[in-house]
Image (cartoon, rainbow, N blue to C red):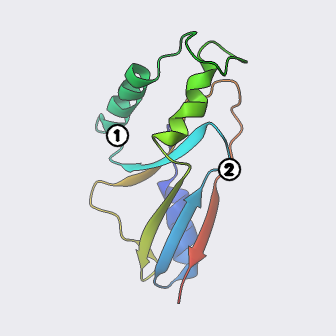
Amino acid sequence: MHNITPQCEKFVRAQGEDGLLHVFVPHATAGVAVLELGAGSDDDLLAALRDLLPADDRWAHAHGSRGHGRSHVMPALIPPYATIPVLGGRMALGTWQSVALVDLNVDNPQRQVRLSFLSD
């Protein structure tokens, strides 16, 4: 799990207006989550994903490391996108909310995040 909030903040600050930030991860094994980070919630999410999607041999999609198929199922639970309102060049997140890239795939450490902005 990677906190991408600072990169998102920098991007919307450059826009300087109201609109919508769209965060998209163009990968079949990654997702974008909006949640509290750093107070245990991120660890709780990863623990829940380990329980729901164990890294074992049950997966039909079986190339790569053991349990790789779970990485391809995860985006159905944590989608590869999020849309966040922006007011006056600032994300309108709740007090404890952050934007995180979630990726269980240990076979490919290279990830891209695409940010786009929609305004009036």
Residue corresponding to mark 2? 26
**Left or right of residue 94: residue 34:** right
Seen in the picture, residue 87 relative to 105 is either above or below; the reply is below
Asked whether residue 102 is in view, the answer is: no
* Residue 20 point in image, percent of width and height: 49, 74
**The disc label shown at residue 27, or none:** none
Choose mark 1 or mark 2, whichever is in front: 2
Seen in the picture, residue 119 relative to 62 is either above or below; the reply is below
* Residue 69 point in image, percent of width and height: 61, 23
User: Which residue is at 52% across, 51% downward?
Assistant: 4
User: Which residue is at 43% across, 75% downward?
Assistant: 86
Seen in the picture, residue 54 relative to 90 is either above or below; the reply is above
Q: Which quadrant of the structure image shows residue 91?
A: bottom left
Dot 1: element: loop
Residue corresponding to mark 1? 38
Crowding at mark 1 (Cα within 10 Å: few <14, some 14-19, many 20+): few
Asked whether residue 88 is in view, the answer is: yes
Nearest the viewer among 76 and 101 is 76
Nearest the viewer among 56 and 32 is 56
Nearest the viewer among 114 and 89 is 114
Crowding at mark 2 (Cα within 10 Å: few <14, some 14-19, many 20+): some
The residue most toward the top is: 57
Q: Tell me the amino acid under the disc marked 2.
A: Pro
User: Which residue is at 30% across, 34% downward?
Assistant: 40
The residue most toward the front is: 60
Q: Tell me the amino acid under the disc marked 1.
A: Gly
Q: Which quadrant of the structure image shows residue 104?
A: top right
* Between discs 1 and 2, the one toward the N terminus: 2
**Left or right of residue 68: residue 119:** left
